[in-house]
Image (cartoon, grey):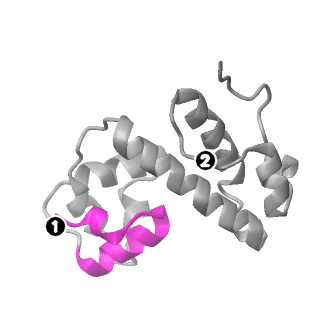
Amino acid sequence: MKTKTARKLTFADLPRDYAGLCGIHLPRPIRDKADLANATEIAFAMAGFEDRLSEDQDDYLDLVSSLIETYEDEHVKTPKRTPLQLLQYLLNEHGLNAADLTRILGASRNLGNAILRGERQVTVAHARKLAERFSLPWTAFIE
């Protein structure tokens, strides 16, 4: 029987070399929720430290993230969101408001409010800035 790891990993717990990381969690296709929980735990331990990852850690995180994405694409049903709903969700999750959106876009004072009210569309240039800020493909923000 597969089980989730017993303790919560932190970035400080992780080896800097690929072989050491494989000793903690060997990347392989995810087949069930326990596999998903283990892979997600190590990915979350590395998340937010992208600027401090060694080359091996970066490669490992890329692989584990791809395995998670593949499993979730096949097994996790998420409701389809419009680009505006996605933007509203991301702002809420990050504790940001319309003024913060305006600053992210580097635009005039009222643009964030206008976009969130549906009065203005996100341009390709805006989508690229949002993609950079939220680490998503720019196409996620375009209708």
118 in relation to 127, above or below: above
Taking the magenta stretch, the answer to whether it contains residue 100 is no
The secondary structure type at the circle numbered 1 is: loop
Residue 133: percent from the left, percent from the top?
48, 67
Q: Is residue 114 left or right of residue 136?
A: left
56 in relation to 81, above or below: below
Residue at screen point 68% across, 23% down: 3
Over which residues does the magenta segment extend? 123-143
Residue 16: percent from the left, percent from the top?
85, 62
Residue at screen point 31% across, 72% down: 127
The secondary structure type at the circle numbered 2 is: loop
Q: Is residue 86 left or right of residue 36?
A: left
Check residue 131 in the rendering and tell me which mark sits there, or answer none.
none
Residue 90: percent from the left, percent from the top?
40, 51
52 in relation to 108, above or below: above
Q: Which residue is mark 2?
A: 28
The amino acid at mark 2 is Arg
Taking the magenta stretch, the answer to whether it contains residue 130 is yes
The amino acid at mark 1 is Arg
- Depth check: give the residue in front, 139 or 15: 15
Residue at screen point 46% across, 72% down: 132
Q: Which residue is mark 1?
A: 120
Residue 122: percent from the left, percent from the top?
23, 69
Say if residue 64 shows up in the picture. yes
Question: Crowding near pointer 1: few (<14 within 10 Å), some, many (20+)?
Answer: few
Discs 1/2, front:
2
